[in-house]
Amino acid sequence: MKKISRKGLLILAAGLAAFPWLAKVVPGLGSYPEVMIYAGIYSLITMGLSVLVGFAGQISLGHAAFFGIGAYASAVGTATYNLDPWLCLILGALLSLLVALAIGVPTLKLKGHYLAMATLAFGIIVFIIFNEEVDITGGPDGLSRIPGLSLFGLKLNTTMSYFYFVWTVVLLVFWFCANLLESRIGRAFRAVHGSEVAAMAMGINISSHKVQAFVLSAVLASLAGSLYVHYINFINPSTCNLFFSVKLIIMIVMGGTHSLWGAILGAVLITFLSNVWLHAFQEWEVLIYGAVLLIIVIFLPDGLAGLPEKIKGWAGRGQPGKAS
Amino acid sequence: MSQMILEVKGLTKRFGGLMALTEVEFGVQAGVVKSVIGPNGAGKTTMFNLITGIFPPTEGSINFRGQSLHGLAPHRIASLGISRTFQTVELFGDMSVLENVMVGQHCRSRGSLLAAGLRLPSVRRTEKAITDKAMELLEFVGLAEHAGEPAASLPLGDQKVLEIARGLATEPGLICLDEPAGGLNEQETQELSRLIRAILGRGVTVLLVEHDMPLVMGISDEIVVLNFGQKIAEGTPRQIQQDPTVIAAYLGEEEDDA
């Protein structure tokens, strides 16, 4: 793996810093900063999923549930019990960690795609709990009047402030995941993905590493859920349904599972497609997702993040290759 | 007499009705090259898989440096100091040559996921040490100039050598080489022979499964011969070459009534 570029991170940060101002000036982009907040929140989940799916080679079809656990922990804790939002965020993350351990430890000892099946079932169970436990979750109506966040006495109650806050978190998580992937643990993830039998022979405890990747991705999804409810101030079960889990997988496949950049790219693209660009298509939207996904899987197996390499490959054909 | 690094006693493996290994016994002295030979299906790779813990023996025991390996997971056995290569190359193809060897250092390094993500100073030091060790091993096997290339892009001979470097990165006391000369040409096989000698020079004992008889006879201190899962002979290359049972097993002089 080439070193994940930190320079790109700086460029992204600069672009993001200018984005809200740009959106104000350019006509027609007025709603874009708000959409970017959601894109940023989803990026937190897709980066975790990228580590899990793209690097450790395990599939989860239930990450909407971890998003939901974080969201409801924050919603119930703050709106019902008046607890500190940051405390609730941490409690939600801890709960997700424990739940992920409870699912991951038994299933990841088995060979095969048992995690996908277990998380699929888990997602459905959690969705039912959110719907049925009316006293706690408010049932299908959900919970409203969830307070906003404030940081060091600064209220994050405007689109602008929340935009900067969320994307700062995204950049920090990117940095964390990039460090991780370039460490011995990241190499162990990729080794397990590449050849389990060889990874074992090199002294890697494969189930422990699969569990670690799964837990990390669950905690990040939970964090995203907490940030989501404190922005939108409302949560109901349909936000964390099975289709959302699938949509998250579509995001990373579209962006490219092997790349953290792809994770962000996929989250941003799908968020804009479903919130802005494909709004006119209404129920045909799903069909277009399907078509886009099909095209990408067939022509760009490494996702959009693999496009530059591919173009380089086409352009560089016949020329002497540079040593990387 | 030097010490036994590996002792195999009464080793039996049954797959359903098939006896892959029956009551096999032998020992490997520290600091030698011991080869396991036998016709196809004799149970050689099965034995490697038992020694490295891929699956448990039906009966019998394997002791490494006096410690029983009974019930230990493969990664624990690797940490104890048994490493291996594979008959069909099992490299991490999308990782670079260097990274493949770095993976071998996994069980000789420490550091939590949290520390790695935050890139604490201890993690940087560990990463530096791992990289240095891996580069040293690539120089040792002669692949240093390919360090940055994807492992899958190497020719087969180099891939086999890279597996050896990766295996050595776990800092083993014993390395099990499963047909390292398979698919190599004559020149590459000679280089391999030199490499195996050099591995001994690093204080690593070699257990070799190989079909290339000139290589086996030239390099082994001792040979065990398996046939249909049973040990039929054990001794020096000279003794093995003159053993009538071995000759019969390889050339099929004696008609078997079964």
Image (tube, rainbow, N blue to C red):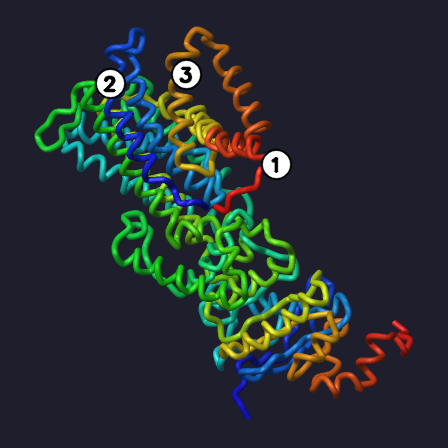
Quarter of image, res A164: top left
Residue sitting at x 17%, y 37%: A87
Secondary structure of residue under mark 1: loop
Chain for mark 3?
A
Q: Position of residue A244 (x, y in %)?
A: 41, 25
Secondary structure of residue under mark 3: helix
Residue sitting at x 30%, y 11%: A29
Between residue A170 and residue A231, name the one nearer to us: A170
Q: Is residue A261 above or below residue A195?
A: above
Q: Which residue type does callout 1 highlight?
A: Gly
Q: Is residue A238 left or right of residue B118?
A: right
Name the image quarter holding the N terminus of chain B: bottom right
Q: Is residue A311 left or right of residue A222?
A: right
The residue pinned by badge 3 equals A274
Q: CA distance from mark 1 to mark 3?
A: 41 Å
Q: Position of residue A179 (x, y in %)?
A: 33, 46
Camera-near label (1 vs 3) is 1
The residue pinned by badge 2 equals A20
Chain for mark 2?
A
Name the image quarter holding the C terminus of chain B: bottom right
The residue pinned by badge 1 equals A318
Q: Which mark is residue A236?
A: none
Q: Position of residue A114 (x, y in %)?
A: 51, 43
Same-chain check, marks 3 and 2? yes
Secondary structure of residue under mark 2: helix
Q: Is residue B20 above or below residue A29?
A: below
Q: Count neighbours of disc 2 (C-alpha within 10 A) and say few if under 14, some if 14 to 19, many if 20 or more.
A: many
Q: Does the image show residue B72? A: no
